[in-house]
């Protein structure tokens, strides 16, 4: 599983990487000896959420990488520009952009406060757009540039939007960045791909918003995302762009045949995630 392919010496800029999936991706890259810059708001400990951008940086260094912790909000274009400049100054360039930062609110149209709507739009769609936009000039100089966005496959089936239109708009906006920018920058050799899990992933969002302990028990560990992300980011960028990958499918392509190692609770039946029909690829699980 991509063991012979490495991110050693590569520089990643990850939005919202202080915990969860973003941190898992950072740590997987760090084990290769990568440079990882994180831009996130979590400067101080949260009463309900584990970790800060500073503890994440410590873990990256301990894993064998070099870390740059940048306190900032990706809703602030100026701060994103500064973060990009700081990353380039520290590490000499950018090879990989990971659009991980995201806000979630799964209520219906009548129940949603417009401030929450704006938050999701500004972090998810706008944030992905501006982080991608401002890293592109540096990615053009890389020998294997990748942009990976954590967003779902695009589908116009009404069932994926009917219960939470606003969230779907915001997440699909991230996926539209992948769709459009993959073509816009194809000639530059920059890969733009999206990655999404088939099952729930054991993160704070699942714990706090999607069913608590019961949902966590039926989730898979964040490493299913970091291992699949690593596989994508070490593929030739000119041969791997414009895809909406499901994590399990990527790992099957890499030779994985059993996902039990990723189970948050051994033996538990994993729960299918939003925007996905089945838990495992055909013939697996």
Image (cartoon, helix red, strand yellow):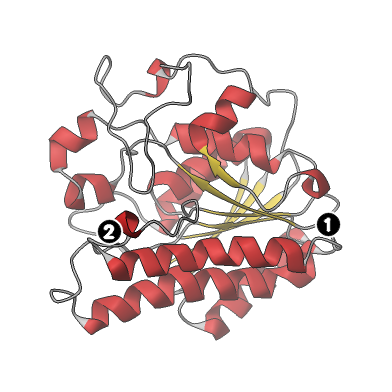
Q: In the rendered view of the protein, which quadrant contains the C terminus?
A: top left
According to the picture, the residue beneath numbered tag 1 turns out to be 189
The crowding category of the residue bearing disc 1, from other C-alpha atoms within 10 Å (few below 14, some 14 to 19, many at least 20), is many
Picture residue at 64% right of the left edge, 23% below the top: 254
Picture residue at 68% right of the left edge, 38% below the top: 33
Residue 57: image x %, image y %? 50, 51
Camera-nearest residue between 184 and 116 = 184
Residue 216 vertical position relative to residue 194 in the rendered view, above or below: above
Which label sits on residue 75?
none
Picture residue at 80% right of the left edge, 60% below the top: 186
- The image quarter containing residue 79 is bottom right
Secondary element type, mark 1? loop
Residue 156 vertical position relative to residue 213 in the rendered view, above or below: below
Instruction: Give whichever of discs 2 and 1 has the lower sequence position.
Output: 2
Residue 13: image x %, image y %? 61, 59
Q: Which residue lies furthest to the front in this view?
A: 157
CA distance for labels 2 and 1: 39 Å
Q: On the rendered structure, is 179 left or right of 200?
A: right
One can see residue 284 in this view = yes
Q: On the rendered structure, is 62 left or right of 235?
A: left
Residue 125: image x %, image y %? 47, 71
Which label sits on residue 45?
2
Q: On the rendered structure, is 44 left or right of 40?
A: left
């Amino acid at each position: 599983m991509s063991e012979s392919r490495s991110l050693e010496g590569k520089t990643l800029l990850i939005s919202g990487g202080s915990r969860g999936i973003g941190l898992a991706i950072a740590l997987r890259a760090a084990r290769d000896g990568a440079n990882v810059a994180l831009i996130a708001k979590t400067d101080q400990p949260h009463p309900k959420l584990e970790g800060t951008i500073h503890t994440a940086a410590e873990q990256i260094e301990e894993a064998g990488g070099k870390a740059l912790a940048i306190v900032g909000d990706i809703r602030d274009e100026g701060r994103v520009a500064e973060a990009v400049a700081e990353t380039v100054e520290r590490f000499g360039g950018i090879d990989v952009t990971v659009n991980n930062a995201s806000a979630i609110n799964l209520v219906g149209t009548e129940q949603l406060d417009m401030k929450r709507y704006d938050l999701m739009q500004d972090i998810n769609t706008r944030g992905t757009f501006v982080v991608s936009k401002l890293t592109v000039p540096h990615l053009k100089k890389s020998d294997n540039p990748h942009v990976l966005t954590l967003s779902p496959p695009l589908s116009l089936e009404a069932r994926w939007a009917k219960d939470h239109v606003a969230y779907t708009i915001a997440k699909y906006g991230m996926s539209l960045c992948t769709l459009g920018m993959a073509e816009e920058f194809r000639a530059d050799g920059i890969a733009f791909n999206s990655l999404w899990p088939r099952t729930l992933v054991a993160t704070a969002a699942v714990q706090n918003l999607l069913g608590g302990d019961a949902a966590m028990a039926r989730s898979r560990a964040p490493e299913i995302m970091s291992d699949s992300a690593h596989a994508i980011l070490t593929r030739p960028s000119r041969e791997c762009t414009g895809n909406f990958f499901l994590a399990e499918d990527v790992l099957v392509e890499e030779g994985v045949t059993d996902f039990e190692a990723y189970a948050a609770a051994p033996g538990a039946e994993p729960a299918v995630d939003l925007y996905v029909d089945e838990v495992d690829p055909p013939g697996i699980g």
